[in-house]
Image (cartoon, helix red, strand yellow):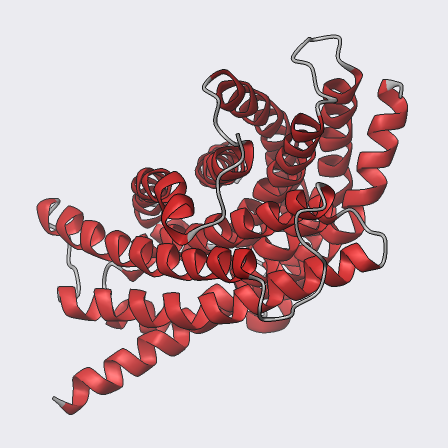
Amino acid sequence: MTVRDVAVEAYKEALPALAASLVGGLIAGVVLGGMRAELRAVPGLLVLVPALLATRGNVYGSLGARIATALHQGLIEPRVTGGDERLRAAATAALANGVLTSTFAAVVAFFLLTFLGSRVAPLPILVGVAIVAGLLSGIVLTVVVVSVVFAGYRRGRNPDTIVGPVVTTTGDVFGILFLLIAVRTVLAVAGVF
Amino acid sequence: MPTEWTVRAITRAMLPVLLVLTLVELGSGLVLGSFEAQLLRYPSLLVLVPVTIGTAGNLGSVLAARLSTSFHLGTLSFSPRDDELAGNAVATVALAVTVFPVIGAGAWVATLLVSGDTSLALQKVVLIALSSGISLAVLAVAVTFSATYVAYRFGLDPDDVVIPVVTNVCDVLGVVVLFGVAQVLV
C-alpha cells in the first residue's frame, strides 16, 4: 500500500469513532462544570481528576487492545460465554489494577498536597471516593469494552480503531459520572458518623 | 512475546506502568489546579479541557493500536520510508484538522446553552481548539512512534506499554498545550 492508501484508510476508519467520542468529551466537560460544589467540598479532588480519568482509559484501553489483538490472531472467539478463562482473567486483572491504581493516586495526592501546604480533604474521604468510583466505573467499562469490541468485530470493523475512542469516551463520561456518585456517597456516609 | 493471560502476569506487566503514569497525571492535575482561576473566568475553556485531552489521547491511541497490530502481524518496519508509518502520521494530522474546529464550536455552544456565557468569542474558541489540535497531533505522532520503537527494542508487548504511555503523555501535553495556546490567544 502507498502512503496515500494507508492515510485514507486510517482516516476513514477513525473519523466516525472520533466524532462520537467528541460528543462524549463535551458531555464530560459539561458534567465537570456542574460538579463545582463537590470540587469545593473535597479539596484535592480536582488534582485527582486527570489521574482517575486516565486510569480508566489506561486499564480498559489496554484490556480492549489485548482483546483486539487476540481477535486478530484468532486466540479468542468474539462471543461472551462466561466460561472463557483468558477473558475472565483479563477482566479480573483490569478491575483489580484499576482500583489499586486509583487508591494509589488518592494516597499520593493527599501527601503531595499536604507537603505543598495546600488545603486537602481527609485521607479516608479521598481514598473512599477513589475506591467507590474505581469499582463502579470498572464494572461498567468492562461490560462496555467487551461488548463493543466483540460486536464491532462481528460486523467486520477493525477492533483496533474502535477500542481507543470507545474507551476514552465511555471512560470520560462514566468516569466523571461515577466520580460524582462516589463523592456524594462518601460525603453522605461520612456525614452519618 | 505477548503477555500470558493470567491475572498475575497481566498485573506484573501493567501495574508498574500504571503507578508511574499516575504520578505523571498528578503532575498534570497540579498544573490544572494552578490555572483554576482562569478556567472559572472563561467557562468555555473549562468545557474544552476534557474534550481536548480526550481527543488528543484518542488520536494517539488509534495510531498506537494500529502500529501495535502491524507490529504483531509483522508488517511494520521502523524506517522513515515505511509507508505504514508515514500514512498513519498523515492521517493523524488530517483527523486533527477535521475534528478540532468542531470541538471548539461545540464547547462554545455547550457553554452558551448551559451557562449563557459568551466571555470568549466563537472564532476565538475555534482558533484556540484548532491551534491546540494541530500541535497535539504532531506531538502525538512523535510520542507514539518513539514509544512503539522503545517497546520493540526492549522486547515489551506494545499493547501493555505503548497505549498507556501515549494516552497519558497526550493528557499532560493536552493540559500544557491548551494553556500555552490560551495564554497567547486569550
Name the residue nearer the viewer: A57 or B41.
Answer: A57
Quarter assignment of residue B77: top right
In the drawing, does residue A51 fall left or right of residue B3?
A: left
**Residue B19 location (% of width, % of height):** 31, 43
Screen quadrant of the N terminus of chain A: top right
Q: Is residue A3 above or below residue B123?
A: above
Q: Residue at point 72% right, 49% down?
A: A159
**Residue A192 location (% of width, % of height):** 16, 91
Can residue A33 be seen from the camera position used here?
A: no
Q: Residue at point 13% right, 67% down?
A: A122
Name the residue nearer the viewer: B150 or A20.
Answer: B150
Name the residue nearer the viewer: B118 or B167.
Answer: B167
Screen quadrant of the C terminus of chain A: bottom left
**Residue B118 location (% of width, % of height):** 59, 60
Can residue A157 be seen from the camera position used here?
A: yes
Q: Residue at point 67% right, 66% down?
A: A147
In the drawing, does residue B185 fall left or right of residue B78?
A: left
